[in-house]
Amino acid sequence: MVNFNEENIAEIFGHEAAEDEDIDRLKSYYFKGTIYDQVANNLPIRILVGHKGIGKSALFQVAMYEQKQEGKLTLLIKPDDIAGIGENETDFLKLIREWKAGISEIIAKKALVSFGLLYEGWRSKLNSYGGQLIDFLQAIFRAENYANLDHTKKVIISDFLKSGKIFIYLDDLDRGWQGNQTDIRKISALLNAIRDLATESKGTAFRVSLRSDVYYLVRTSDESTDKIEGSVVWYSWSNHEILSLLVKRIDQYLHGKSKSADELMKLSQPVLAGHLNEVMEPTFNGKGKWEKIPTYRMLMSLIRKRPRDLVKLCTLAAKHASVAERELIGTPDFNGVFEEYSQGRLQDTVNEYRSELPDIERLLFGMKPSRAERRTGKGYIYSTADLLKKIKNIQENKKFYFYGNRPADTKDLAAFMYKINFLTARKEKGEFIDRRYFEESRYLSHKFVDFGFDWEVHPAYRWALQPDDIADVFGSLAPSSE
């Protein structure tokens, strides 16, 4: 039986931000889903798009680690590295040119610093190569004596001189995103710049991570981004993959080894769930449709198909079990943390998107079911017409504005809530629910045309909206079909 102390809980379920893990530990339990190979390859541009907490940074960390182990030259560019580029430029073509020059300088400097080769006058030497970044770096590396470098760095330089290949990762660049025209132009110019650099300087391979809502707004606002659409990889998880991820982590902790991702994905969900029995009870005894259902189905229904949600929910429940001195996480532990978990997800969403819609809290809390809606038993479920009516009622008190004082009409607000995964599209299929997320069906919300789907407030938020009546929260909530 597991002793649920703080250290063991972290060992079992992992860090909420997997990229903050020690890389060796992250590598030991990292689950390579179907998306990994679409990003970790030799193609010149890959743009990884997905919601916050879905694992973009973790994927980058593992890909960089493995490429370094193979002797590849890899660099990581963070938001503070590019701060100030093109701040005062209003002409878009000149803005792209500034981004190209700025990124080239950052790459060159980071590469030289990593091998202790930075010298006075390197910028003018780079400029003399007319943007041929690979040629510049290879010329510098060939002219140096590497007697004092360790073996790993010598291998990387040797590979670079032969292949002329450098992998540049740009992560978390949408930090501070406000959804205004300046932000859109900034990301658009960045994407155009790396496309030009990859074309002009053969051997540069760019990997960029963006939140799904950021990319969607840039893509629909700037027609030039159609040229990089083929390089976009939408990062999403199936419930089967997330359950396999949890099994991999638990097996790694309990037995020091685990099956590969491919092997785990071939197992049925009930078989996978059997691997959880040494950590949590197999049956969740909830109410209504949640009475005596498999625990894994409860977990899959309450997470937003993001690994971070699963880590958070299991970690909270494990801590609750520890206080109660239980050796298995059970129904009382999950019931005891649902409200805290839900409040955390709602607060995360508010923090993440407040810059885009300053009055987001009023909108989301306005979606709490009214007494009349609760009496119908479908307080969180809406047809398109009913959803728009609900939002209009919220708007009656005060109008909503996006950042920059841009008015938000009813359909704008509905699309916004779908985009941030507060709302999901749903269609009943027997006793189960087919739920669609923004990154899976991005155009379901376009002008909110009726595609035959209803809409529901995601289960992860319901305890935060309605902590006074947990039974009612369960009442209208059917477990996921996966």
Image (cartoon, rainbow, N blue to C red):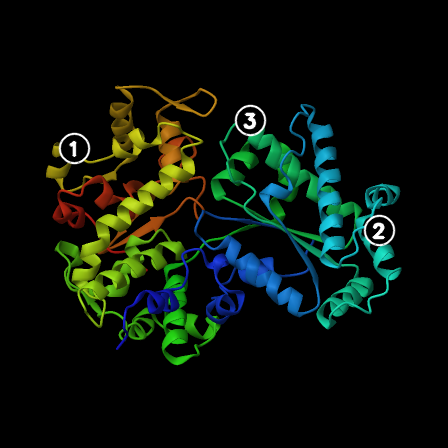
Q: Could you tell which of marks 2 and 3 lies nearer the N-terminus?
A: 2
Q: Is residue 448 left or right of residue 471?
A: right
- The residue that disc 1 covers is 370
Which residue is more in the foreground, 362 or 458?
362
> SS at mark 3?
helix
Tell me the distance, in whole angstroms, between the alpha carbons under discs 2 and 3.
35 Å
In the picture, which quadrant includes the C terminus?
bottom left
The amino acid at mark 3 is Gln
> SS at mark 1?
loop
The amino acid at mark 2 is Phe
Tell me the distance, in whole angstroms, between the alpha carbons under discs 3 and 1.
37 Å
Mark toward the viewer: 2 or 3: 2
Mark 3 neighbour class, 10 Å CA radius: few under 14, some 14 to 19, many 20 or more? few
- The residue that disc 2 covers is 136
Q: Could you tell which of marks 2 and 1 lies nearer the N-terminus?
A: 2
Q: Position of residue 333 (x, y in %)?
A: 20, 61
Confirm or deny contact between disc 3 and disc 1 (CB under 8 A): no
**Residue 121 is drawn in which quadrant?**
top right
**Residue 42 is drawn in which quadrant?**
bottom right
Q: Is residue 59 left or right of residue 275?
A: right
